[in-house]
Image: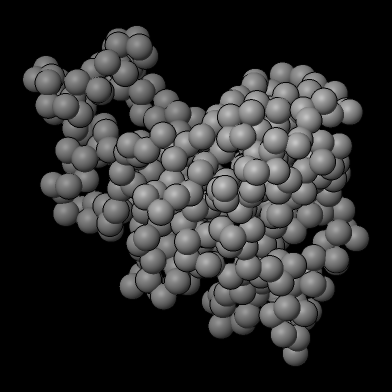
Amino acid sequence: MKKRIIVAYKFDNQNISVEVVEKTNYGSFLAYKNTITNLYLNPSYLNNFIYRTKYEIEKTIKAKITDVVIIVKNSQIYPISKKIISKDNVQGLSNNEIAKKLYYLEKENGYYLFDYEIFSKIDKKSLISLSLLNWNEAKMIFSLMKQNNLNVLRMYEYDFLENISNGNNFKNGVATFLKLSNHDLKIEVSKNYVNFLEFKYDFGINYLIKALSKELKITENEAKIKLNLWSHNLHAEEDLKINTLVSNFLELIKNTINSNIEKLKIDKNNLQVNLSKEFNIFNKILLNNEDFSGINNKIMGNKTSLISYEMLGLINLLDNHFTNTIKEMTITSELFVIDTEQFNNYSFNYKK
């Protein structure tokens, strides 16, 4: 019996995890999921997790797995950097030749190249944005998989897959993503889902909470409660003050976007903004105030599926046969077909 099983091991600052999805004619279903807190970075600890989860996955799906995808999230442990170079460095080469040259050039520089995107800036000069991971970190991940007889089909950047899952709001292949967390605001400018420019600012939701706490003379926990009640129209007291502070916060975000647009000479007609789900708390103002019409194009909806955003992005990538530049390889779901009949002759007594 044939099954289409997609296995993804994910690495970030907080956790190491694995997610397994089975694709059928009726849709995609979560088959297995496991996570450990990334407290111990020694290879034997990580190797044990991969060894154990591989056993559990194969027991669950009743088949042997050999191919996996790696997803890396930009973090302190796995820092993903952006580098911009002139296309003059690879002038006259085909796309495949560009990919090959850039891959090996960055490997010599000590980096693993996730992907690249060609874009024009200011004087219409063609530039190339590179997405890079320290080669030692990439090598460590590849080594862990090899020790467990797992072949890495591709290594992807988390934001790239998340953008595919959420970012249908593109114009001329360009989109802007605003991702709000408790600690910061991240602005990503993407072309064909690859972020070629990223900016991070230290005014996340906590920035607004502190402003509310100071203005209303209450604790930060009380400010969080009031903001939540306000967003659901359940709080009549001090609504005007909260409205003003939230509007000021959104104005700060809008001005930051406009400032970057002016610096980068981006055509405003091409500025398609996608807001992370955290912006839902501000719908009361975003949907009713024309002053913020430029940043309310699309709010990424709350996900109801058990499958993660990044895995949904990977599935979308497979379903649409999205062409990848690096290694001249187009990854498709056919690469994940496994045979459960072989499982009967397979022993779980691996040698680590």
Q: Residue furthest left?
A: 236
116 to 5, vertically: above or below:
below
Q: Quadrant of residue 90 in the image?
A: bottom right
* Residue that appears at 57% across and 50% down: 2
Residue 335 in sight here = yes
Q: Position of residue 52 (x, y in %)?
A: 72, 24
* Residue that appears at 46% across and 57% down: 316
71 to 323, vertically: above or below:
above
97 relative position to 295: left or right: right
119 relative position to 51: left or right: left
138 relative position to 57: left or right: right
Residue 14 in sight here = no
Query: Which of the image's four quarters has the C terminus?
Result: top right
Q: Position of residue 248 (x, y in %)?
A: 29, 39
Q: Position of residue 51 (x, y in %)?
A: 76, 28
* Residue that appears at 21% across and 40% down: 283
Q: Quadrant of residue 262 in the image?
A: bottom left
* Residue that appears at 56% across and 77% down: 120
129 to 208, vertically: above or below:
below
Q: How many marks?
A: 0
From the viewer's side, name the closer residue of 318 and 255. 318
